[in-house]
């Protein structure tokens, strides 16, 4: 961490950290190990280098602790590690509680989103949750990812509503790429949000019958059981659900403008759009996302009647 990036903590913030670590299950864990989990290195690696060694001191007293004397950067690094670790240690207890001073603001998730290169203004309507949670967020008139995160923090102690919202925040707190990807189009291993994963999320949210219809119309072979499910599905319900999905894809293409232009160009120039979705890393979902994209851009995969001709009369 360069000196330019060192965040200057206040006495108030250090008191918040100390308060949380006094009863934390991680206060006996080596700071070096905690640092590895949050991506911050700690110079001392020994069994007595734990949070307990430091939280007995005030911020001013830390400047006199051996190893920290004259090392303000090291003090800030210690506080960075402990502050980020609170996201791992019962994020819905330690992190959500406010300190006595009402002016204190917990911006842990903002820091996490910044590290993941995820825009805080990403539209809330693009996040993938259960229908109940979606209705809850809609009723609260939440429009951005950050608003959803802050609302989730307030709900953290409520075990009745917003269960998958808690799971989402827990995934963020632990920087669990697989868990995060279930709710927003995060690109595992590369960071950031992307159109391919966003369209894949739309497809993943479809009922099984629509997914099977998409695969069938794309030429993917189905098992006898899957074929039975597909044939029993209501055509009206399937078309209605697909219409909503295509509206979502349209909105996503307007948000991910540059990537949408690239994908459309791939289609129009006879390229290989399947490669666009390889980062999804789930072959079946990749095919679903590809099928949705073809419908959105009005591309026929084959000339035998046109893709989804049965559904839309094309």
Image (spheres, rainbow, N blue to C red):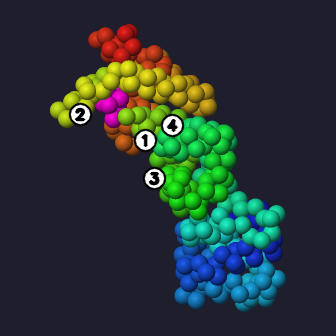
Q: Position of residue 226 (x, y in %)?
A: 23, 33
State which quadrant residue 44 falls in: bottom right
Q: Is the magenta stretch mostly helix, strand or loop?
A: helix
**Nearer the N terminus, badge 3 or badge 4?**
3
* Magenta-colored span: 208-214
Q: Is residue 206 left or right of residue 101?
A: left
Q: How far apart are marks 3 and 4 (CA)?
A: 14 Å
Q: How far apart are marks 3 and 2 (CA)?
A: 27 Å
Magenta stretch holds residue 212: yes
State which quadrant residue 241 falls in: top left
Magenta stretch holds residue 83: no
Query: Which label sits in the foreground, 2 or 4?
Result: 2
Above or below residue 164? Residue 4 is below
**SS at mark 4 in the image:** helix
Q: In this view, does 96 lie to the left or right of 45?
A: right
Query: Which label sits in the foreground, 1 or 3?
Result: 3
What residue does disc 1 label?
Answer: 280
Dot label at residue 178: 3
Q: Position of residue 139 (x, y in %)?
A: 63, 40
């Amino acid at each position: 961490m360069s000196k330019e990036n060192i965040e200057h903590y206040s006495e108030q913030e250090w008191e918040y950290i100390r308060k949380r670590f006094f009863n934390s299950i991680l206060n006996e864990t080596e700071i070096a190990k905690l640092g590895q989990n949050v991506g911050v290195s700690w110079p001392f690696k020994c069994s007595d280098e734990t949070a307990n060694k430091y939280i007995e001191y005030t911020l001013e007293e830390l400047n006199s602790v051996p190893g920290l004397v004259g090392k303000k950067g090291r003090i800030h690094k210690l506080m960075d590690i402990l502050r980020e670790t609170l996201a791992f240690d019962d994020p819905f207890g330690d992190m959500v509680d406010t300190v006595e001073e009402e002016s204190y603001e917990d911006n842990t998730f903002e820091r996490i989103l910044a590290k993941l290169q995820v825009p805080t203004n990403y539209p809330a309507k693009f996040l993938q949750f259960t229908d109940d949670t979606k209705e809850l967020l809609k009723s609260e008139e939440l429009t951005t990812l950050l608003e959803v995160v802050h609302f989730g923090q307030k709900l953290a102690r409520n075990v009745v509503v917003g269960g998958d919202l808690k799971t989402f925040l827990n995934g963020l707190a632990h920087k669990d790429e697989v868990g995060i990807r279930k709710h927003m189009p995060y690109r595992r291993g590369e960071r950031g949000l992307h159109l391919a994963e966003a369209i894949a999320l739309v497809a993943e949210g479809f009922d099984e019958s629509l997914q099977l219809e998409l695969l069938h119309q794309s030429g993917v072979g189905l098992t006898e059981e899957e074929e039975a499910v597909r044939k029993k599905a209501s055509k009206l319900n399937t078309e209605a659900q697909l219409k909503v999905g295509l509206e979502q894809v349209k909105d996503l293409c307007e948000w991910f403008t540059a990537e949408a232009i690239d994908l459309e160009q791939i289609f129009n120039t006879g390229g290989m759009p399947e490669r666009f979705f390889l980062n999804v890393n789930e072959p079946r979902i990749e095919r679903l996302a590809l099928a949705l994209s073809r419908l959105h851009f009005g591309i026929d995969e084959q000339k035998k009647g046109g893709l989804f001709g049965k559904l839309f009369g094309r």
